[in-house]
Amino acid sequence: MDKDNKLIPGLPSGFEDRWDKKLLLKKKLLKAIEKNFIKFGAVALETPSFEISENIGSFLAEDDSNPMSDVFSFQDGEKNITLRYDLSSPLARFVAQNNQDLPSIFKRYAIQNVFRNEKGGNGRYREFMQADFDIVGNVNSAQANAELCNLISSTLLDCGLKKDQFTINVSNRKIVQGLIDDLKIPDDKQLKVIRAIDKLDKPGFGLKGVEDLLKKERKDKSGAITKGADLNDEQASKVLNFLKIKDLKELKEILKNPLSQQGIKELEQVFEILGYGTNLNQVKTNLAIVRGLSYYSDFIVETNLNFTVTNNKGKKIDIGSICSGGAYAKLISRFKGVDIPGTGISFGVDRLLFALMQLDQIKVDNQKPVLVCVMEEKYLKNYYEILELLRNNNINAEIFLDTKKNLGKQLTLANKRELDVAIICGENEFKENTVTVKNLKGVKGENNKTFPKKNLIDEVKKLI
């Protein structure tokens, strides 16, 4: 390949390489999340990246004219297949397919990548990892949904967050559905109304942005136009007045629709169960959250961070929910012969990682190796004996892999990799059966120490 035709390295928009500290922190988060999933009684499930398109559905879509625009779909023989956009739809297919073999109450967790064909940036990705916990079966819904809130709190605390750094917001979709029914909003407009309400707390929206989406259209700062639900002034006004109410007791007095009343009662029952534990103060009512995915039926939860997150340019951004979910009554019943409700949550692992990388409070154990330097090629066997001794004592270690490089270049590599310790042994050390250890983080001129080889392990452990 000639110089002019050489490839330019790069990634598509919305994708990211992760390595070193960021990847170590991600693994720490995953360990804490999985530990809590297991602690709360779930078993692991892994499903393929692809599902048959009609099975996975188009619950993500906001464009009715092109319902698969937000996902990656491909022709596969006579069928279309889609890269999963969440882990709930594959769970529904799995439960329907294996219902006879599963317990009557099935708790499962899954930690896998999902794919969305949307604009990336500011902690949003087109390929990202989700960690899901779901409870499937006929259960006491208040207990199950309170358990989800307890799980969120326990997990985020184990991830290294403090209680005042996150808030678990809950609502019930029946509350707003009752209002929609009272306003006689047609079926083909209802999802647009729900998605408009869900935008209330998003940057650049507020009540005015929601009002525009409830009516004819909304134009953003770039001039892009989003078609609205086309409600009349009276309908839009009543929805906006509803969004101004923050208290369940006040809401109970105003909304008399039976479905709304049922939703309020179910939410009160969740808070009652939460009161039996220690997480009640972490959970707040937020009637504006209704979740954009169309399969949610009643309980809704979104978890938000209470500290500032910035993008790569240092500009404050809204990173959105880092753990969300809710109850779905009909997601599984789409399949023949099965009618089982479920409820669950999903941690956006990579979004959470993006935010936590900006905090200094969460430390990761890097466990960087000790570098065994190669001073003279004729002593290569001796260097490998030291390497073996370190590894056999559970000390991460590596040997420099080029016998032609001088010591200075070897130490330059060690410093670039921010290693802590180097072993430097030459002819004198091998004759006297000693070892010289260099503390790469120590004071220059005082950071070399020579001692009998038998003390090597104890001395190295003092420095790592």
Image: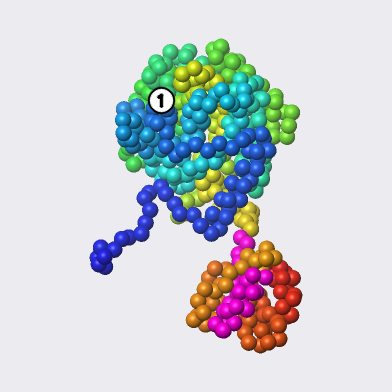
- Disc 1 marks a residue whose amino acid type is Lys
Residue 281 visible (yes or no): no
Which quadrant is the C terminus positioned in?
bottom right
Q: Is residue 289 above or below residue 370?
A: above
Which of the two residues, 265 or 91, is positioned nearer the viewer here?
A: 91
Residue furthest to the front in view is 381
| Mark 1 burial class by Cα count in 10 Å: few <14, some 14-19, many 20+ | many
Residue located 57% across and 55% down the image: 24
How is colour applied across the structure in the image? rainbow
Q: Is residue 394 above or below residue 207?
A: below
384 inside magenta stretch: yes
Which quadrant is the N terminus positioned in?
bottom left
Q: Which residues are magenta?
A: 366-389
Q: Position of residue 276 (x, y in %)?
A: 74, 28
Residue 222, by quadrant, is top left
Residue located 62% across and 78% down the image: 382
For numbered disc 1, what is the local secondary structure? helix
Residue 191, by quadrant, is top left
Residue located 65% across and 48% down the image: 160
Residue 391 visible (yes or no): yes
178 inside magenta stretch: no
Instruction: Determine whether, in the image, residue 257 is placed left or right of residue 125.
Output: right
Q: Position of residue 49 (x, y in %)?
A: 44, 39
Question: Which residue does the numbered mark 1 point to in the structure image?
Answer: 192
Residue located 60% across and 72% down the image: 371
Q: Is residue 360 above or below residue 371?
A: above
Q: Position of residue 16 (x, y in %)?
A: 44, 52
Q: Position of residue 100 (x, y in %)?
A: 56, 23
